[in-house]
Amino acid sequence: MSVRLMVGTGKGGFWVTSDDRRSWKVTGPFFKGWKVTAGLRLADGRFMAAVASDIYGPAIHVSVDGEEWEQLPSGPAYAGGGDRRLREIWTLRENRGVIYAGVQDAGLFTSSDGGASWAPVTALNEHASREAWMPGAGGLCCHALLFDRNNRERMWCGISAVGVFRTDDGGATWTPKNHGVPAALEDKRHKGIGTCVHGLAQDPDDPDRIFRQDHLGMFRSSDGAENWERNEEGLEVAFGFAIVIDRASGNLFAVPLEADQYRVPLGGALQIYRSTDAGDSWHSASAGLPAADAYGTVLRGAMAVDNLEPGGVYFGTTSGTLHATADLGENWTNIPAILPRILHVSAWVG
Amino acid sequence: MGAVAVTLPSLLDPATGGVREMAASGETLREVFADLIEREPRLKPHLFNEAGELRRHVLCFHNGTNTRWLDGWDGPVADGDTVLFMQAVSGG
């Protein structure tokens, strides 16, 4: 079964493909010189990539074959006249025929026509607490989206330095859901925000079980984010950004980093931590990864799973190295390439 | 109505399909910009911000003059004028 990775970097996108998950072929760059910040494979098979430039701003491109790309005539955009700017698209997701774009400055946009037109999710973008949303080191961005496969009206979004919001009415209203997570920056007027979610992963069998890599630790909710509890047993450090879950095994993978002003692997050892018991405990699963002198960070969007059995996990670093396991982290290999700073990794089968 | 030759930077190839020389027309620079965007709407978010201003680090030269030095975009343009877009280079 062939695996295709979309690797988004600070200077373009790369395809990384393999028929056996052992030997890999790197092609690219596409969008040379552009940041590739998010990727998506649509239900109709097309690829979608979000790009951005510090000079020329963001855009979304689509491709049928992954080679020829076409920029969408119009992408998500804030209305003119205000101070809000759409700087980057941090995540692209599709659910029940609707495409979602989580963006910086923090907000959410949707398209119901395959990307031809986009509409703001006004109830979130203009949330009453917005006046108190303060950007973190990574900016003010909506970077994580989760859906409830049993309830089309419910979804969650994660906004850095603000927290998790949930809607139970198809996006008409949104409520902060951060009880149990300490605030990184508390606001006197608006309660329930000021937490700093870095990454979210969701149990594929139980949408209400959500795992949260937060600025202030590792957390889990078993009730749809109503309440969060710490689950850090075994973690040497609990700071990090990326967290993913393998669908078949339920194994969780995270990348602990030395907090928080350093944001590098602890002691220069690039380590992946795995939980095989739904977050009750964590252990290092890092055989084959650099054990010393490795100081590249793994950003929140730079780790992905292929959901094959056994599961493949892939991540890239800010040093441009790319790593893969085809056995749920028992053994890691280095994909031989030195890429620009890696911002995003997506994995698709076939 | 002036017919203006517009030159675009290579980094905008993904928006234009690789076209770096375009024609645009108008009585004023503002009309030329509007015509350019009408011809290639994909350029709009890359050259102008939500307020309709040039993006912060985009430079535009009308006949070699930085448009930020002009008193707005409502001055006349003429046949054969040139408009050059490029990115501001600052830092190391």
Image (cartoon, rainbow, N blue to C red):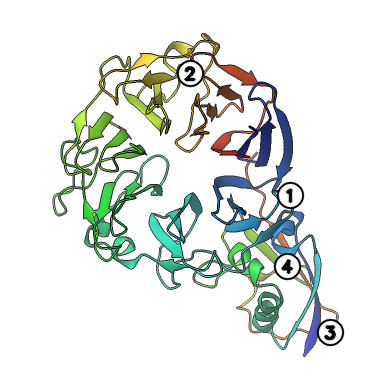
Q: Amino acid at mark 3?
A: Asp
Front label number (1 vs 4): 1
Q: Amino acid at mark 4?
A: Phe
Density class for disc 1 (Cα within 10 Å; few <14, some 14-19, many ≥20) is few
Q: CA distance from mark 2 to mark 3?
A: 65 Å
Q: Quadrant of residue A171?
A: bottom left
Residue named by callout 4:
B61
For label 3, the SS is loop
Residue named by callout 2:
A329
Q: CA distance from mark 4 to mark 3?
A: 16 Å
Residue named by callout 3:
B79
Rendered position, A102 above or below B67:
above
Q: Amino acid at mark 1?
A: Glu
Q: Quadrant of residue A234?
A: top left
A142 left or right, relative to B15: left
For disc 3, the chain is B
For disc 2, the chain is A
For label 4, the SS is strand
Density class for disc 4 (Cα within 10 Å; few <14, some 14-19, many ≥20) is some
For disc 1, the chain is A
Q: Nearer the viewer, residue A329 or A241?
A: A329
Instruction: Return the x and y of residue A286 as percentages of the image width and height.
Output: 48, 13
A19 left or right, relative to A92: right
What mark, if any, has residue A67 been given in the picture? 1
